[in-house]
Image: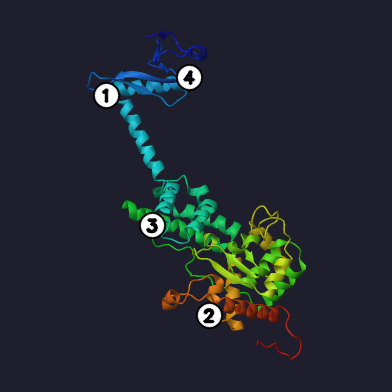
Amino acid sequence: MPHVRRFTPIAIAKLKAGVSRYEVSEDASPLRIFVQTSGHKSGGIRYRRPNTRETAKWTSDIPVTDLAALRKDAVDAAFMVSQGADPGKAKQATEEKEAEVRADTFEAAVRTYIKRETGKVKSMRWREKAFERLILGTLGHRPVSTITLKEITALCDTVEDERGPAMADHAFALIRRVMRWHAKRNGTTVPVLLGEKRNPNGARSRILTDNEWRLGWAHAETTPGVFPLFWMFLLHTGCRRGEAAGMMWSELDGDTWVLPPERSKNGLEVVRPLSKAALRLLEDVPRVGPFVFSATGARPLSGFVKPKKTFDKAAGISGYTLHDLRRSSRSMMSRAGVQADVAEMLLGHRVGGVRGIYDRHSFINEKRHGYELLARQIEAIVRPVEGNVVAMVR
């Protein structure tokens, strides 16, 4: 076996690949350089396993370019051998433990959850996107068992600052769901989250007052840009923020907006025959690409926090989320006399019970009438009739 008096960077660089693997030792330490037929070089030691006549090779993870650290690592491994330990088995045990840790990361748990539960949960596509946008960048690399409530709270606080309290509650619920699911599958417990709720007061109930409708509407009508039109469209349709933001011109069929199943939260196609007022709003949207509400047309509208803050400050309204507009619109439907089942269909909700199973009528005319009633009610609110004349609904 070739050997040198002492390894130097130049001496290691001169070691060339041969027709077979070989190794070179030095006189000054137990370090050996292993040279593969590919030319790859690594450092390590040759040793006899404790209580056996079997010899083994231990390879360091330190590159040969860091010669001082590599030599120290070899000396430490040789010392383990002198103490009756096996550095090869110790390294294998460490690698196995690291592999277990990698397999138990939060991202691994999320990927397994998505793979196993897709098809059982209709909103899985939305959940997967939410994990990617909000959570995995911060917690993905962490082992599930080491994540603390303090870390989760800090993450959700950041989400609330950037995207609003409702999205922060969603993020917290997603983390809790995966951690509980992971704990049940692996026979472990996650006491930090099993009984916790981010919002102990329950679901939001905020709707805009008539005065807030008027203030917001007056500002939206006189302010250029995509966001004001988007804000009014949400109130005219009661759709989800993401549904409107990702709306494409190709989804419009005459006066009807057909939301495809892949963009619907419950996986169902949602047919919305828009009111004349909603269609007039779309006429004011510039056609700059495939997406309706977009600054460039190439990408759907996103990053709602900053434009909403600017809009709210100028309009003089506050304390609501964009999802509260959906609730406000639904409440206004009831106020306008829209039949309850029709209103739920316009929101994209399933009709439950026996009726939902057996009644397959499309209700297209009822939906169209419902949206027209909503549009009239909005008009009556944002432009009230002067004096004692009351606008009547036919």
- Decide: is 272 above or below 38: below
According to the image, label 3 marks what residue? 180
Q: Nearer the viewer, residue 332 or 190?
A: 332
Residue visible at 76% across and 63% down in the picture: 224
Q: Where residue 13 sits in the image (x, y, percent)?
A: 51, 14
Q: Amino acid at mark 2?
A: Ala
Mark 2 lies on a secondary structure that is: helix
Q: Earlier in the sequence, mark 2 or mark 1?
A: 1
According to the image, label 2 marks what residue? 340
Q: Amino acid at mark 4?
A: Leu
Q: CA distance from mark 1 to mark 4?
A: 26 Å
- Residue 264 appears in the rendering: yes
Tell us which disc is closer to us: 4 or 3. 3
Mark 1 lies on a secondary structure that is: loop
- The N terminus: image quadrant: top left
Q: Nearer the viewer, residue 344 or 308?
A: 344
- Residue 321 appears in the rendering: no
- In the image, which disc is placed on residue 67? 4
Q: Earlier in the sequence, mark 3 or mark 2?
A: 3
Residue visible at 74% across and 66% down in the picture: 284
According to the image, label 1 marks what residue? 84
- In the image, which disc is placed on residue 253? none
Residue visible at 45% across and 19% down in the picture: 38
Q: Residues within 10 Å of mark 2 (few under 14, many from 20)?
A: some
Q: Earlier in the sequence, mark 4 or mark 3?
A: 4
Tell us which disc is closer to us: 3 or 2. 2
Q: Amino acid at mark 3?
A: Arg
Q: Amino acid at mark 1?
A: Gly
Tell me where residue 253 sits by quadrant: bottom right
Q: Is residue 278 left or right of residue 29?
A: right
